[in-house]
Image (cartoon, rainbow, N blue to C red):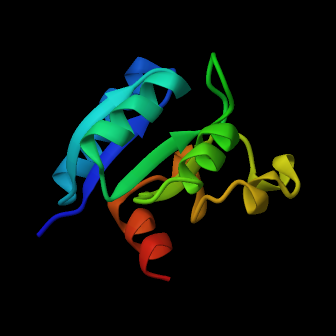
Amino acid sequence: MSRTVVIVDDNERFRTWACDLLAREGYAVIGDAGAGAEGLRLTESLRPDVLVLDVQLPDMSGFEVARRLSRGAATPAVVLISARDRDDFGTAVLHSGAQAFIGKSDLSGTSLRAVLEG
């Protein structure tokens, strides 16, 4: 059975590319959003296995979205993404409640599986 995924990123072209890429690699992309609040609503209603979440969103940071989700009962595996390096965010990734961080240029089904399984 494939893992279900919701993608939250303010760049529509990136979301389309990521949806297509992950679907081709065996994931069931069940939703996408362009802002944090919309991503929270989708995640709570669709209950995906995985949330691929951009760090920089127009209404709130991906760190805040991850923190809010980590307080819930049924939390998906949150994988933060960014065009910036993980080191640029200091300890924010560690304290966000996210399971992992992947650079946008490194996002693939293989990299997603690696961070989810390891």
Give the image location of residue 63, x and y in percent.
69, 43
Locate residue 28, reporting x and y percent: 18, 51
Residue furthest bottom in the image: 118
Is 102 located above or below residue 83 in the figure? below
Q: Which residue is drawn at 37% across and 68% down?
A: 110
Residue closest to the eye, 19 or 64:
64
Q: Which residue is drawn at 54% across and 27% down?
A: 36
Q: Residue at x 88, y 54 (%)?
A: 90
The spot of residue 77 in percent (x, y) is 45, 61
Would residue 83 be seen by someone viewing this image from the given angle? no
- Up the image or down, 97 lies above or below 66; here it is below
Residue 116 shown left or right of residue 36 in the figure? left
Which residue sits at x=34%, y=33%?
A: 42
How many marks are shown on the rendered structure? 0
Quarter assignment of residue 82: top right
Which quadrant of the figure has residue 15?
top left
Q: Quadrant of the N terminus?
A: bottom left
Residue 53's place in the image compared with 95, above or below, is above
Q: Which residue lies furthest to the left in this view?
A: 1
Q: Where is residue 56 in the image (x, y as percent from the top left)?
A: 67, 30
Q: In this view, does 2 lie to the left or right of 32?
A: left
- Residue 98 visible: yes
Residue furthest right as drawn: 90
